[in-house]
Image: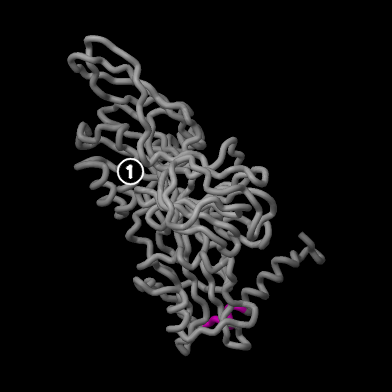
Amino acid sequence: MRSVKGINVSMVWVFLVSLCLSSVLFGAKLSVQTWQKGESFSQYVQRQGMEFAVDSGISEEDSKYLSEIQANQAFYVLKDTDESIEQVLVPIGEEMQIRLAKERRSGRFIFDIIPISYKEKEYSATVTIYSNPHTDIKKTLHYPALADKMSQLLKGTVNTRGLKKGDTLSFIYVQKTRMGKPYYMPHIKIAMLDSKGKKQLIYADEDGYGYTSSKKSQAYTVKGRKKVTYTRRVKVKGKKHRFIMPLRHARITSSFSRRRFHPILKRYRPHHGTDFGAKRGTPLLAVNAGRVIFSGYMGGYGKVVKIKHDGGYVSLYAHQSRIRVKRGSYVKKGQIIGHVGSTGRSTGPHLHFGLTKNGRWINPMKVLSRKSAKRTILKKMTKYEATSTTKYKTVNIKNAKENKTKLLEHIKTQGKPFIWHTLEQRSIRIDHVI
């Protein structure tokens, strides 16, 4: 970083910019509003009488993100002393937001999509059990969402009905905050239950589910019944909603992300899908049976097929070179519906595969099956008796040793927990990004 006679030039620049912005926005008011149910983005803009500056409107590429705005979604409006709107920030997912900012000279608005700025802090707490973990966390820390996440962590790992009055539950969690308020759900990293002097550690995976071990391979028990006269091995049919990969020999080139730097636009954008690299002309397969609800050209996605499946799922196959199905037709799981190409906004031949559930984008790789082998079980053919089978699954538990050390230090020092009802929205200055 360049300095002049011991003075950091970048620090002087930040000070001058902050001083100018503070004087411009002095007296401005920030309010939190709720997006009206049934109102589209264009209807909101018209209702507010907003006009876009030249070359600053909504591009075809960005228009598809407008549908991400949810009814009753909280968003932020900054007004000047004359009650004239200066900025509007509308979240689209957890990481990105739409920004409308007024130009000082023209009074018109600039549209952009930018990352959401939030604070993330780690907290620790110890709660004494008087009734049950869920109730006692709410009463002690005044944060119902944290109580819900603790219930998720303990489910299947701890028999909470066996807890006694006076038992303690210590844990470390991370919370994002925005405008001085909790932003999205907390994430519990690790917990320790002390019941009758017996201590039990519970580790959390990235989705917030608990395990009594930090090993990558976790055992779990499947209970059932069997017959005991004779046995034979039979295949277990897959469930109807089971999804297969959209092409054979899949190779992932870009994963699902809520904030990815776009290789062509050179800006941050959500990437609501998974990209698979493949040669031009590679057959594309329907991931499950369903009805084709779209077959044609879709802007930056190029040639697209969309299929509606049972369970509220809709799959999307973009950038095709040739489409093999028509709108309204029904397809089977594994049926060829098109071929890999590079139509639309694309850097080369690949498949952009997207998946929504009940209208919201989800990570396809949490649903798609990488394995095609069918499971088998031993089936007894006379009378039944109870059985239990131990199976294993891969679990990603991050920083287990580090989190354990932090938790033991918290228990040792008995640090004072943060009480969430004391957190109030503070007066803050708003510049170009919130």
Q: Residue at x 74, y 64 (%)?
A: 8
Viewed as shown, does residue 237 lie left or right of 325? left
Give the amino acid type for the residue marked by disc 1 in the picture: Met
Q: Position of residue 348 (x, y in %)?
A: 69, 51
Evaluate whether residue 416 shows in this view: yes
Which residue is nearer to you in this view: 50 or 421?
50
Is 24 magenta? The answer is yes
Which residue is nearer to you in this view: 368 or 73?
368
Residue that mark 1 sits on: 150
Q: Position of residue 188 (x, y in %)?
A: 40, 44
Q: Secondary structure at mark 1?
A: helix
Residue at the right extreme? 5
For the rendered model, the colour scheme is one colour
Viewed as shown, does residue 202 lie left or right of 158? right
Q: Taken as a whole, is the magenta stretch helix, strand or loop?
A: helix
Quadrant of the drawing holding the N terminus? bottom right
Is 17 magenta? The answer is no
The part of the image, by quadrant, that contains residue 251 is: top right
Which residue is nearer to you in this view: 108 or 405?
108
Instruction: Note whether 21 is above or below 223 in the view shown.
Output: below
The part of the image, by quadrant, that contains residue 297 is: bottom right
The part of the image, by quadrant, that contains residue 33 is: bottom left
Evaluate whether residue 390 shows in this view: no
> Magenta segment, which residues?
21-26
Instruction: Note whether 344 is above or below 127 in the view shown.
Output: below
Viewed as shown, does residue 367 lie left or right of 278? left
Residue at the bottom extreme? 82
Which residue is nearer to you in this view: 62 or 427?
62
Q: Position of residue 171 (x, y in %)?
A: 38, 41
Instruction: Note whether 163 is above or below 138 in the view shown.
Output: above
* Mark 1 surroundings: few (<14), some (14-19) or many (≥20) residues within 10 A: many
